[in-house]
Amino acid sequence: MAIVVGSPIPANQLGPLEPVIVAYQMSRQTYLAISVFLFYEFFLTLDQEIEHIWKFRWNLTSALYIFVQFPSVYMTLATFDHAGVK
């Protein structure tokens, strides 16, 4: 049986809602884990990015890197609240 803290429904009366709650909690935890990994990787490689991308003249490779790297960070920040992570 699920333990729901602060729920208006007693835990012993959740019945068919229990799988929905478990799935929702799992999706929130998965989203949080993916977000943490994304930002960890971003900050881990920041010094290499500065050295190899920002200090040299812009070319197609630099533009493609920026085009791929920054939308993922932006989308993670933009959807952070929508995933229930506050």
Image: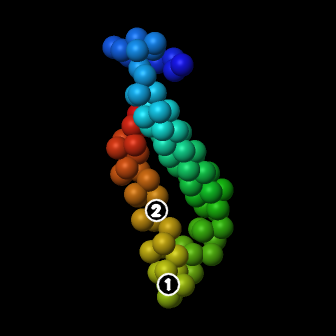
**First in sequence: mark 1 or mark 2?**
1
Residue 11 picture quarter: top left
Q: Is residue 24 above or below residue 53?
A: above
In what quadrant of the picture does the C terminus appear? top left
Question: In this rendering, would 67 be left or right of 56?
Answer: left
At 46% from the left and 58% from the top, the residue drawn is 73
The kind of secondary structure element at disc 1 is loop
Residue to which mark 1 is pinned: 58
Residue 70 picture quarter: bottom left
Q: Is residue 6 at all visible to an observer of this figure?
A: no
Residue at the extreme front: 16
Q: 80 or 40, which is in the foreground?
A: 80
Amino acid type of the residue that numbered disc 1 sits on in the rendered structure: Trp
Q: 68 or 13, which is in the foreground?
A: 13
Q: Is residue 27 at all visible to an observer of this figure?
A: yes
Contact between labelled residues 2 and 1, with CB atoms less than 8 Å apart: no
Percent position of residue 63, x then y: 47, 81
Q: Residues within 10 Å of mark 1 (few under 14, many from 20)?
A: few
At 60% from the left and 68% from the top, the residue drawn is 49
Counting the numbered discs, the total is: 2
Percent position of residue 12, x then y: 46, 12
In what quadrant of the picture does the N terminus appear? top right
User: Disc number at residue 72?
Assistant: 2
At 51% from the left and 20% from the top, the residue drawn is 2
Amino acid type of the residue that numbered disc 2 sits on in the rendered structure: Ser
Percent position of residue 71, x then y: 42, 65
Alpha carbons under labels 1 and 2: distance apart = 21 Å
Percent position of residue 18, x then y: 46, 27
The kind of secondary structure element at disc 2 is helix
